[in-house]
Structure formats: C-alpha cells, structure tokens
Image (cartoon, rainbow, N blue to C red):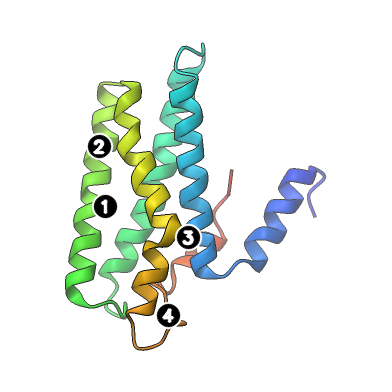
Amino acid sequence: MSANPLNAYQEVEKATLSGRDLESTVLMRAAMRLMDIKHNWDKPDREAELDEALRYNQRVWTFFQAELLNADNPLPAEIKRNLLSLSVFVDKRTFDVMAFPVADKLDILISINKKYCSGITQQLCLSLPSASLCAFPTCGQHLAGYTLR
C-alpha cells in the first residue's frame, strides 16, 4: 500500500471499478484535466501541463482504438467504424492543439470525453446481445494497470 493517501485511494479504485466504470473514470479525468488547463490558460506552467494532459487523453483513446480493432470485440462493425472515426478525429485534434495551442480547441476534446462518459457507453452496451458487455470488453483490464491521475 502506498504512503500517499491519494495513491492508496487510486489503487483501491482501480481494483474495484468495472471495465466500463474505469473507462468512464479515465475519460472524465482526462476531460477535467483539459478543462482545468483551459480555465487557467495563462498559468506559467501551462505548456507542460497541456502536453501532459493531451498525452494522457491520447493514451486513453489509443487503448480504445486497440480494443476496437480486436477481433473479439462484440460491437457491430458499423459502431466500431464510427468509434474508430471518432478516435481518429481525437488524434487529429490532439496533434493540432500540440502544434498550435489555443484554449478553445480543447472544447471538442472535453465534450467528446464528457459525452462518452455520460451515456454513450451505456447505450452501446444495451444494444448488444448481453447488457453486461461493454464497448471495450478488455479495455478495463488494460486500463486497470494504468496510472490514474
């Protein structure tokens, strides 16, 4: 167990969240980090924090891309294609913000993450033969080893 109470809490959180909950948690954390940077754009260390937050968000979406390309993913092909298109857009916007930082460019990344967290996953899961399946069935396993900050 970690000496830092926050790290200890995050370890317990990772061990107890379902895959779907973990997906939502990491996406919401990414959105919150981007929102904080947007609202504190003139902060002296914004450049480093922005880079770190964008890379975090990109890593999360990279996990999703890998899951969507997994042959065992139970989602219908059309939904997978749509989510992959969305992830490509997230990648392009991320690179654009890294190259040409503007606070308002973060809005769409924040919005995508928040909307995904607020119900897209649940709706996708309900459309599958088993409501217990989620859009990224093994993503939670991969994300469980990922540092949540």
* Residue 23: mark: 3
Q: Earlier in the sequence, mark 4 or mark 3?
A: 3
Alpha carbon distance from label 4 to label 3 = 13 Å
What is the C-alpha distance between the residues marked 2 and 4? Answer: 29 Å
Tag 4: residue type? Leu
Q: Are marks 3 and 2 in contact (CB under 8 Å)?
A: no
Q: CA distance from mark 3 to mark 1?
A: 14 Å
Q: Which mark is residue 142?
A: none
Label whose residue precedes the other's in the sequence (4 or 1): 1
Pointer 2 residue = 93
Quadrant in which the C terminus appears = top right
Residue at screen point 51% across, 11% down:
44
Q: Secondary structure at mark 3?
A: helix
On the image, the x and y values in percent for residue 36 come to 51, 29
Residue closer to the observer: 61 or 135: 135
Q: Amino acid at mark 3?
A: Glu
Q: Amino acid at mark 2?
A: Arg
Counting from the top left corner in percent of width and height, residue 28 is at: 49, 48
Q: Residue 54, relative to residue 114: is it above or below?
A: above
User: Going from the N terminus, do you reach mark 1 or mark 2 first?
Assistant: 1
Residue at point 21% right, 46% down?
A: 89
Q: Residues within 10 Å of mark 3 (few under 14, many from 20)?
A: many
Q: CA separation, marks 4 and 1?
A: 20 Å
Q: Point out the tag, 3 or 1, that comes first from the N-terminus.
A: 3
Q: What amino acid type is highlighted by mark number 1?
A: Ser
The residue labelled by disc 4 is 133
Q: Which residue is mark 1?
A: 87
